Amino acid sequence: MRKTISIIFAATLVLCLSTLAYAFNPIWARTEVRFTYAAPAHPIYFVEVSVEKLNGSQNRLTITITEFYPDGTEKVITESYMIPNNAAGEYVVGNYIVYVDAKGNVQIRKCEVVGQTTPGTEAIGITSVATGNGQADINFAIVSVNGKGYTVYLSENGEVGSFKEYANVSYNATGAQIKKLTNGKTYWAYIEYNDGNGNMSRSTVVSFTPNK
């Protein structure tokens, strides 16, 4: 049978379920996305998301993606993130970009795969975020100190579809500096990198509030 590397969305099925067991126990959401495929590069995959309530306003978000290949093999990818109460945003798990709305602390309202980075590329790992007067510094292992190939996307609410390319950015040896922000206002941002050869990688979404 002739193989194809194209992903065909005609047979896509998305299912998201959440259940509550006991107070302080994780609430699980399960998303199933089915693709027609013929090449191992595009497996069927399942997404499992859980949020565990911790002390204070911190929670542990765990996202697990299991890929099922035509030859019967499986690959499991898991990432965990510390998130505040009422968090909604995008998270990088392997080459997948997963949106999770965990508003209401550990109640998962929505979970879906919203994109993928180029297979074989590593996600941009943000090491720290520092805020100042009308600005924010996002630090990561930058490969082009003049910013070539990098784009910063900014949002004022963190919702999917609200991120727009932001131009008031300068780059240096430690990362990106976002300028001309409003003090006391919370923003969400992520960074995308394209090497010019069709390979794209991006970071997780981070939030910050500039201050004087």
Image (tube, rainbow, N blue to C red):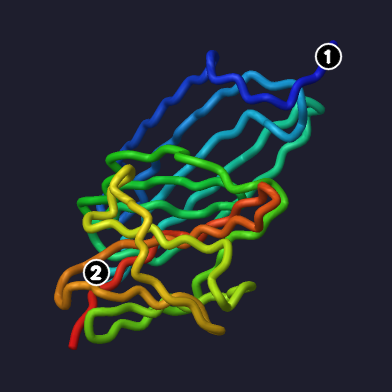
Vertical order, 55 against 197 (above or below): below
Q: Evaluate if marks 1 and 2 touch, with contact meaning CB atoms under 8 Å apart.
A: no
**Please, what is the three-letter code of the amino acid marked with disc 2?**
Ser
Residue 191 in percent (x, y) is at 47, 62
Q: Earlier in the sequence, mark 1 or mark 2?
A: 1
* Label 1 sits on residue: 2
**Nearer to me, 80 or 211:** 211
In this view, the residue farthest toward the right is 1
- With respect to residue 123, does 34 lie above or below? above
Q: Amino acid at mark 1?
A: Arg
User: Quadrant of residue 124 in the image?
Assistant: bottom right
Outermost left residue? 184
Q: Secondary structure at mark 1?
A: loop
Q: Residue at left 36%, top 83%?
A: 130
Seen from the viewer's position, the closer of residues 54 and 12 is 12
Q: Is residue 144 left or right of residue 41?
A: left
Residue bearing the label numbered 2: 57
Horizontal and vertical percent position of residue 206: 37, 65
Q: CA distance from mark 1 to mark 2?
A: 53 Å
- The outermost residue toward the bottom is 212
Residue 1, image x and y in percent?
Answer: 85, 11
Q: Is residue 193 above or below residue 211?
A: above
Q: Which residue is painted at 51% across and 58% down in the image?
A: 192
Where is 19 relative to 54, above or below?
above
Q: Secondary structure at mark 2?
A: loop
Q: Is residue 31 visible?
A: yes
